[in-house]
């Protein structure tokens, strides 16, 4: 089928999904030991979207992420070591330890940043698409955002302009059923937020966000048409956040039966089942073990790296120099 990932691409998606899961589990464990700085927004259960949606992009294509961006970073080609180092504020981090877990960027890979301001990545990615169009570059922009971000006013403004100017951008909506602790039913009267795309005059597709092949196909088709100059498109990937909003979440608002039902459809299991006939269970288990070892090594190395040295800004000295 056109836009389907090759077996090699599927294997790489499978591997990266395991890197992300291991990263999240390790961060969760370190948070419990009091070793993380501030809350971490884990994406367990959403790995298929971030990794598969970015798998067909080049380094010159831009991605704007969210506060829950670890799968987007790894999917877009960042190594896990500089990501871990950045999360822990070390000089070896992808932003030299100055960004932290929500704002990771690496322009050389086209990852132009996470964003902690809900909805703000949507106009930023739209602006990046406009720059590609104005400069005549053959590159697309992708904005990955949540169902909470979809309810912001700025989302409407950005999508309207993207469609009006036929910008080369793909909007990937990670519909994980919650905005903070607020259920999606309390945020919007409609279940399928992507029906709004028709109002902007752009195509959309709804996919199972726990199926990496389905995500790749749907997003790949939108990326191709955007690259051909046919304008923006939207993919709404239905998924579920298996962990709390952040590592500081006290829980209690996600139904046990929902968690169990979505765990039964864990994207890692879906990816395993899609590949096992082709390459065998033993090979897949080896890939899993290698991903775990890679993440362990990244933590070992990053956590002994130095912190950046900052010179504190002396406001009164600066003021006295001016006056
Ligand atoms: C402008 C703004 N308003 C509120 C917040 C607080 N806040 C942080 S994440 C979040 C919910 C985001 O929900 P969604 O976009 O669905 O992303 P998810 O956390 O589900 O991945 C809110 C309200 C914020 N960071 N920025």
Image (tube, rainbow, N blue to C red):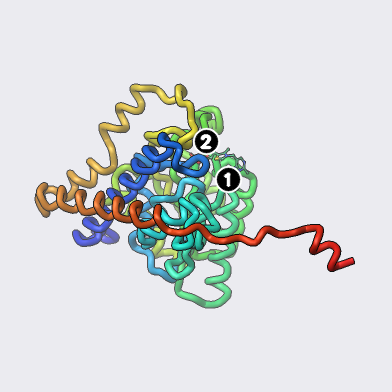
**Separation (CA) of disc 2 from disc 1:** 10 Å
**Ligand 1 quarter of the rendering:** top right
2 and 1 marks in contact (CB < 8 Å): yes
Pick whichever, 136 or 61, lies toward us.
Answer: 61
Query: Where is the C terminus found, in terms of image quarters?
Result: bottom right
Residue located at (45% from left, 74% from top): 138
Q: Can residue 124 be seen in this view?
A: yes
Residue extending furthest right?
323
| Callout 2 secondary element | strand
Circle 1: element type: loop
Q: Does the residue labelled 2 lie within 8 Å of ligand 1?
A: yes
Q: Residues within 10 Å of mark 2 (few under 14, many from 20)?
A: some
| Closer to us: 74 or 90 | 90
- Give residue 35's mark: none
Regarding residue 169, the answer to whether it shows in the image is no
Q: Quadrant of the N terminus?
A: bottom left
288 relative to 154 in the view: left or right: left
- Image side of residue 265 versus residue 169, left or right: left
**Eyeballing the image, is 139 above or below 145?**
below
Image spot of residue 228 (x, y percent) = 43, 70
Q: Which residue: 38% across, 64% down?
A: 57
Q: Residues within 10 Å of mark 1 (few under 14, many from 20)?
A: some
Q: Position of residue 69 (x, y in %)?
A: 45, 50
Give above or below for 58 relative to 149.
Answer: below
Which residue is the site of mark 2? 179
Residue bearing the label numbered 1: 118
The residue located at (53%, 44%) in the rendering is 196
- Asked if disc 1 is less than 8 Å from ligand 1, the answer is yes
């Amino acid at each position: 089928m056109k836009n389907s990932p090759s077996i090699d691409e599927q294997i790489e998606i499978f591997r990266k999904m395991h890197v992300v899961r291991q990263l999240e589990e390790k961060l969760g464990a370190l948070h419990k030991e009091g070793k993380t700085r501030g809350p971490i927004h884990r994406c367990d259960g959403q790995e298929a979207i971030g990794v598969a949606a970015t798998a067909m992009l080049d380094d010159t294509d831009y991605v704007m992420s969210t506060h829950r961006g670890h799968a987007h970073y790894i999917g877009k080609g960042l190594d896990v070591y500089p990501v871990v180092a950045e999360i822990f504020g070390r000089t070896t981090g992808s932003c030299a330890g100055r960004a932290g877990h929500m704002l990771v960027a690496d322009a050389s890979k086209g990852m132009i940043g996470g964003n902690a301001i809900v909805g703000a990545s949507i106009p930023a990615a739209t602006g990046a698409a406009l720059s590609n169009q104005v400069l005549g570059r053959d590159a697309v922009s992708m904005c990955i955002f949540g169902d909470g971000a979809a309810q912001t006013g700025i989302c409407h403004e950005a999508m309207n302009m993207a469609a009006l100017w036929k910008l080369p951008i793909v909007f990937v909506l990670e519909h994980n059923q919650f905005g903070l602790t607020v259920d999606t039913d309390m945020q919007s009267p409609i279940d399928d937020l992507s029906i709004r795309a028709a109002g902007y005059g752009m195509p959309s597709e709804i996919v199972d966000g726990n199926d990496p092949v389905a995500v790749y196909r749907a997003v790949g088709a939108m990326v191709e048409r955007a690259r051909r100059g046919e304008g923006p498109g939207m993919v709404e990937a239905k998924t579920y956040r298996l962990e709390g909003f952040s590592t500081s979440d006290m829980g209690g608002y996600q139904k046990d039966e929902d968690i169990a039902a979505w765990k039964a459809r864990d994207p890692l299991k879906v990816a395993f089942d899609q590949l096992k006939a082709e390459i065998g269970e033993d090979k897949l288990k080896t890939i899993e073990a290698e991903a775990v070892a890679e993440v362990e090594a990244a933590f070992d190395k990053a956590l002994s790296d130095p912190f950046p040295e900052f010179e504190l800004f002396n406001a009164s000295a600066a003021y006295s120099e001016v006056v």
